[in-house]
Image: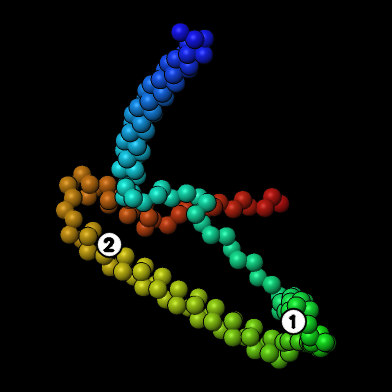
Amino acid sequence: MSPGASVHSFLNHMNTFNHSILEAALVGLEARKKGIEAQIAEVRAMLGSRPGQAAATPEATPRKRRRFSAATRRRMKEVQQRRWAKIRGASAPPAQARPEAPKAKRKLSAAGRKAIQEAVKRRWAQKRAEAAKAASARRKAVVKKAAPARATKKSAPREKAVLKKATAKKAAPAPAPAVAAPAA
């Protein structure tokens, strides 16, 4: 046997050895993958989501869109028009748009302000009147319901005596405070 043949057989043996190790590793990893997929399915079932549906993530919410003012959009338009003019090779860039004069701020006249204040006062007075009317109606309903309940209630003789004493105390006038006569 030549020395090169022994090295070659050794390398073949190592390739076979590495191949079998890699196959075993692949089988183990696939088994772990199946276990993880089963656990994911259990968690999704607990959440109540469908298997093909991805779980909701907080990153899924869309960001608010940034809004530009009219003046900024106009400047962006002009700059873009200049860029396109350069690309097309136009001889002169488009004329700049006149800057718009800001609108005068609207002011409320004294008469207008007074009319609004009076209208608000009328509305609140009406609302208070309606609330008072509703409250008095509720009080009357409560009194009407309470009165028949006391009249139909039968009480024991002892309770009647207690009630008589209580009403007698209420009906009796309070003694007038004694006024001391001035010392002469």
Q: 98 above or below 36?
A: below
Q: State the residue in front, 114 or 172.
A: 114
Give the x, y percent position of residue 23. 38, 25
Q: Pinpoint residue 4: horizontal percent, then vertical percent.
A: 52, 13
Q: Nearer the viewer, residue 172 or 67?
A: 67
- Disc 2 and disc 1: Cα gap in Å? 92 Å
172 displayed left or right of 3: left
In this rendering, the answer to whether 108 lies above or below 72 is below
Q: Residue at x 57, y 60 (%)?
A: 63
Name the residue tied to disc 1: 88
- Quadrant in which residue 112 is drawn: bottom right
- The residue at the point 27 percent across, 51 percent down is 163
Q: How was the colour assigned to the protein in this rendering?
A: rainbow
Q: How many marks?
A: 2
For the residues carrying marks 2 and 1, which lies nearer the camera in this image? 1
Mark 2 or mark 1, earlier in chain: 1
In the image, residue 140 sits, relative to residue 172, either above or below, namely below
C-beta proximity under 8 Å, tags 2 and 1: no
- In this view, the residue in front, 106 or 94, is 94
Q: Is residue 163 left or right of residue 77?
A: left
Amino acid on which the number 1 mark rests in the picture: Arg
Q: Secondary structure at mark 1?
A: helix
- Name the disc covering residue 117, or none: none
Q: Residues within 10 Å of mark 1 (few under 14, many from 20)?
A: few
Where residue 121 appears, x then y in whole percent?
59, 81
Judged from the image, the secondary structure of the residue bearing numbered disc 2 is helix
Type of amino acid under label 2: Ala
Q: What is the quadrant of residue 86 in the picture?
A: bottom right
75 in relation to 19, above or below: below
On the question of residue 21 being in view, the answer is no
Q: Determine which quarter of the picture holds residue 13.
A: top left
Q: Which residue is mark 2?
A: 146
